[in-house]
Image (spheres, helix red, strand yellow):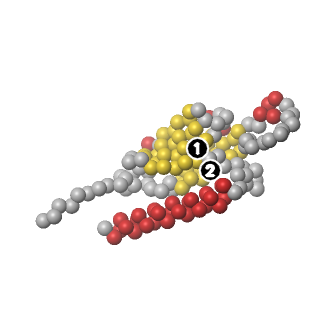
């Protein structure tokens, strides 16, 4: 029982650190010094999966690379600048990001790497990471003798 409490504490700390990191670096710095932008990302949990949802409209599948190493999912890609396709533009506003992007997402539990699946529909990249038996929450009813 004590080990479960320790693991829960570690998980909560990891989640808080990820939230802090995201708040400090992604909200205030949409572009890094190298010009790499970070698309918005949601990470949530269901009973059997960790789901990562990333908004990357306008990106070709061939320009995406997804790798999993340890507890980190690395998503890299490239969105073509339309001005390079149809000529020079005089912008009034420019809020859309083009060029290379990169996201490094912490995965909070062990997963079945060979069973990961990816969907890309309507500009949303959905990565489904099935939890391993170690990562699943399990309720056990203990009988009183």
Residue 2, relative to residue 52: is it above or below?
below
Residue drawn at the location 58% of the way across and 48% of the way down? 41
Which residue does the image show at 70% across and 52% down from the upper left?
30
Spatial CA span between label 2 and label 1: 9 Å
Confirm or deny contact between disc 2 and disc 1 (CB under 8 A): yes
Residue 13 visible to the viewer: yes
Q: Which element carries disc 1, helix, strand or loop?
A: strand
- In the displayed structure, 134 sits above or below 95; it is below
Q: Residue furthest top?
A: 86
Residue at the limit of the structure toward the front, as seen here: 92
| Side (left or right) of 112 relative to 26 | left
Viewer-side residue, 3 vs 94: 94
Which quadrant of the rendered structure holds the C terminus?
bottom left
Q: Position of residue 99 (x, y in %)?
A: 74, 43
How would you rate the neighbour count of disc 2 (Cα within 10 Å): few for under 14, some for 14-19, many for 20 or more? many
In this picture, is 45 found above or below 24?
Answer: above
Q: Quadrant of the N terminus?
A: bottom left
Q: Residue 80 has which mark?
A: none
Please identify the quarter of the rendering in which residue 142 is found: bottom left
Residue 62 visible to the viewer: no
- What is the total number of numbered labels drawn onto the structure image? 2
The answer to which of marks 2 and 1 sits earlier in the sequence is: 1
Q: Position of residue 66 (x, y in %)?
A: 58, 44
Extreme bottom residue here? 2
| Label 2: which secondary element | strand
Q: Which mark is residue 54?
A: 1
Q: Nearer the viewer, mark 2 or mark 1?
A: 1
Q: Which mark is residue 103?
A: 2
> Which quarter of the figure has residue 23?
bottom right
Residue at 55 percent of width and 63 percent of height: 17
Q: Residue at x 78, y 42 (%)?
A: 94
């Amino acid at each position: 029982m004590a080990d479960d409490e320790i693991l829960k504490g570690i998980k909560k700390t990891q989640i808080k650190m990820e939230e802090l990191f995201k708040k400090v670096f992604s909200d205030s710095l949409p572009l890094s010094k190298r010009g790499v932008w970070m698309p918005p990302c949601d990470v949530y949990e269901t009973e059997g999966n960790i789901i990562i949802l990333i908004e990357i409209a306008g990106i070709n599948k061939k320009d995406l690379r997804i790798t999993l190493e340890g507890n980190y999912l690395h998503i890299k890609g490239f969105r073509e600048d339309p001005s390079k396709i149809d000529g020079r533009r005089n912008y009034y506003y420019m809020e859309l990001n083009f060029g290379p992007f990169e996201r490094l997402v912490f995965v909070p539990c062990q997963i079945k790497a060979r069973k990961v699946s990816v969907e890309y529909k309507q500009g949303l990249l959905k990565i489904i990471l099935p939890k391993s038996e170690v990562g699943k929450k399990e309720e056990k009813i203990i009988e009183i003798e």
